[in-house]
């Protein structure tokens, strides 16, 4: 997948915004402009990301004078893989592009690097499936070991 082994700008921006939203109190909402400022994300780009996240129930937006954005469900229920999949709109964090860039890799028709590439990516995929927005907000379980 294009975001692996690193994260795309979209993914980093979305995760930064999720941390800001995760820090809001109760039913508090935040405007796109304020969210963009706090998350250090261009507001026009953030609006697009929020639409994707909203379609998947990860954030909810309300228009009008008292509008703004907040998380669509508890930060403890939102896995990082959910956020990244919402950006791709097709379970993108579950798909792996060919490490050689030639075609999609799969066990039935692997490229020369497929098996080693998969072994290298699996720990990152486990991390994305295990970590929640709440953990990002509180930095729980994110300390480096070793």
Image: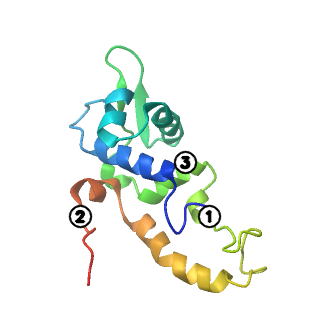
User: Which residue in the protein does label 2 denote?
Assistant: 140
User: Which residue in the protein does label 3 denote?
Assistant: 87
Which numbered disc covers residue 1? Answer: 1
The Cα atoms of the two marked residues, 1 and 3, are separated by 13 Å
Task: Name the quadrant of the N terminus.
Answer: bottom right
Q: Is residue 58 above or below residue 106?
A: above
Point out the tag, 1 or 3, that comes first from the N-terminus.
1
Residue at the farthest top position: 65
Which residue lies at the image location 49% right of the left edge and 65% below the top edge? Answer: 6
Which residue lies at the image location 46% right of the left edge and 36% below the top edge? Answer: 46
Q: Position of residue 20 (x, y in %)?
A: 29, 43
Disc 3: CA contacts within 10 A as few (<14), some (14-19) or many (>=20): many
Q: Nearer the viewer, residue 21 or 47?
A: 47
The Cα atoms of the two marked residues, 2 and 3, are separated by 24 Å
Which numbered disc covers residue 50? Answer: none
Q: Position of residue 59 (x, y in %)?
A: 42, 39
The Cα atoms of the two marked residues, 1 and 2, are separated by 27 Å
Q: Nearer the viewer, residue 140 or 26?
A: 140
Q: Nearer the viewer, mark 1 or mark 2?
A: 1
Judge left or right: residue 39 versus residue 43. left
Task: Name the quadrant of the C terminus.
Answer: bottom left
Judge left or right: residue 95 versus residue 109. left
């Amino acid at each position: 997948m294009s975001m692996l082994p690193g994260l795309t700008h979209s993914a980093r921006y979305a995760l930064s915004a999720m941390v800001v939203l995760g820090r809001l109190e109760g039913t508090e909402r935040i405007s796109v402009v304020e969210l963009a400022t706090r998350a250090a994300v261009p507001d026009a780009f953030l609006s697009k990301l929020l639409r994707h996240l909203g379609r998947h129930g990860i954030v909810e937006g309300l228009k009008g004078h008292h509008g703004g954005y907040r998380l669509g469900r508890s930060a403890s229920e939102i896995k990082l893989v959910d956020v990244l999949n919402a950006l791709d709109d097709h379970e993108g964090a579950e798909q792996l592009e060919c490490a050689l860039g030639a075609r999609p890799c799969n066990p039935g028709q692997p490229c020369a690097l497929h098996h080693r590439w998969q072994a290298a990516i699996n720990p990152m995929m486990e991390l994305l499936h295990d970590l929640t927005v709440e953990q990002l907000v509180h930095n729980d379980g994110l300390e480096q070991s070793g």
